[in-house]
Structures are given as C-alpha cells and as structure tokens.
Amino acid sequence: MRSSRAVATAAIAATVLPLCAMVGLQGAKAQGRQGSTTPNAAAAEVMRVYQGVSDRGSIQEALDNAVGSALNSLPGADRMVRYRVREITGEQGGIAGINRVRVSIETLDAEPIRSPRNSGQAPVENLPGALTSELTLRPNRVRQGQTATFELTVRNRSDQPARITFPTGQQFDFEVWRDNRRVWRWSQDQAFTQATSALALRPGQAITFTGRWNLRNDLGERVIPGRYEVRGFLASGTDGRNIGKLVGDTEPLTVTQR
C-alpha cells in the first residue's frame, strides 16, 4: 500500500505534463523587462522566478498565485507576462493533514535559456568572479500586517557561459536576521526535489529570484518593530551559500508599527 506522500507525488506528476502543455499554448498575460547591454550581446536577458503556494492542494491556485506575483512586479496597468512552469512540488498527509502544492514559474525577456548536457558551459568554479548579485527589497520599510518582497538578481558578468550546479532542487534562499540571530528563513517551510539541479547563464545574462515575507518568524509569530537585515543568496554547498565564492547580498529592512 502506497503512502499518502507517494500518492500525492504521483498525482502531481500526472498533472505536470498537461499543465506544462497548457502553459505553452495559452501565452499568459505579461510584458518582459529589458536587460542591460553587454560588450558581447545587444541586450542581456533577465530571467525571473516566482513561486505560488496553495494550502488546498490546488495546482491551478498555486499557479495563479505565482502568475499574480509576476504581474504585480510589472509597472503600468496593461501588464502581461509570458511564462513557463519551472517546478511543481508538494506534500500531503501527516497528523496535521497537510495538502500543500507549490508551483515555480520563470519569465524571460526572450526565449528561455536551454541547458543541453554537452553545451560546453564552464562551471562557475572555473570562472572566478563570474557572478555578481544584487538584493532588492520592495519596500525596504514595511508596516506590521504587510508583506515584504525580496528579489535577488544574479548576473553572469564574464564573457563565457556559466553553469551552476545545486545538490537539490533548491537554487536560492532568503533569510532575515536581527542582533546576529536568524529570525526567518524562506526555505524553512518549503519542499524541494532531492535530485541535483543546474542553472545556465549566458554571458551578461541575469536571473532574478523572488520571495515574500509576511513579517513572521520561523515559529509563525509576528516580529516586533525594529531594524532587520535581509540576506539573499544562491543555495549550494553544505552551508547553503558557497559556489566557489559567496554569491549573495544583504540589505537593511525596517519594520514599523501599524
């Protein structure tokens, strides 16, 4: 007899292919952002990753949530985003009767980057200083009861394609610290595939990872007003940070009363 987790995994897997086909056909609403130019390219692509969650086990609800985050990040009233499903994970069962589904999508200014096995892309370890990172907080001053959005943009500044490998499906993380103590971690309540994954960036290309914080700590308690430090970084290696060198950034965040 299969466990509830196995059943949930099978159900999700059975939905991935038709859902991906639906995404490829429908061309959802959005408008891409232009990347900066580089010496070797007319325009650098910027890939952005968004995640949606459904606590009712609905893939469509999680997908709509992710697309909503993408739309909210765009300026103007007539916003349109074209995306593809990056990953679907979930968990179901247990004493608490969990039924949670997560959908990650990615958007690109141009065609999605392909990562064939024999692409000739050099690992980041062989390209010292190839990656730069920038963390953006939206907003950087937030009231209790609101939500803060974190965006970590990682760019390949080298003139060679770079390939980044990860031990699991997790490729990035965000943390909030105060007084040298970690208050919250984005990945704390996330589920990731345990298979290795990879990210390929062409020269000058950038990818932006997005996470949201509801101003609660890892125990689910509301944090007190004050000044915090937000850390965003690529998740690789045993300490979750190292890819040849530290690839991450920090920014201050102020939490105020309502």
Image (spheres, rainbow, N blue to C red):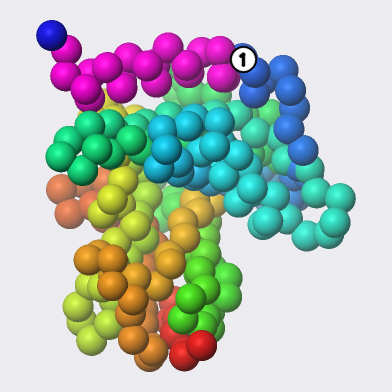
> Residue 227, how many percent across, how many down?
38, 88
Looking at the image, residue 122 sits to the left or right of residue 84; the answer is left
Q: Nearer the viewer, residue 98 or 161?
A: 98
The reply to whether the magenta stretch includes residue 99 is no
Q: Is residue 159 visible?
A: no
Name the dominant secondary structure of the magenta segment.
helix
Give percent across and percent down for residue 138.
57, 70
Please give the range of residues in magenta: 2-20
Q: Amino acid at mark 1?
A: Ala
248 vs 192, left or right, is right
* Residue at the image position 51 percent from the left and 69 percent from the top: 147
Q: Which residue: 60% across, 39% down?
A: 64
156 or 103, nearer to the observer: 103
- Disc 1, SS: helix
Residue nearer the viewer, 206 or 235: 235
Residue at the image point whose x is 22% and y is 25% from the top: 5
Residue 136 in view of the camera: yes
203 displayed left or right of 71: left
Relative image position of residue 234 (x, y in whole percent): 36, 51
Q: Residue furthest right?
A: 78
Q: Quadrant of residue 100?
A: top left
- Residue 181, by quadrant, is bottom left
Mark 1 Cα within 10 Å, few/some/many (few <14, many 20+)? few
Of 210 and 204, nearer the camera is 210
What x and y, as percent, mark residue 50? 53, 46
Q: Which residue sits at x=21%, y=22%? A: 4
In the rendered image, which residue does mark 1 sit on? 21
When the figure is inspected, residue 177 is found, relative to residue 8, above or below; the finding is below
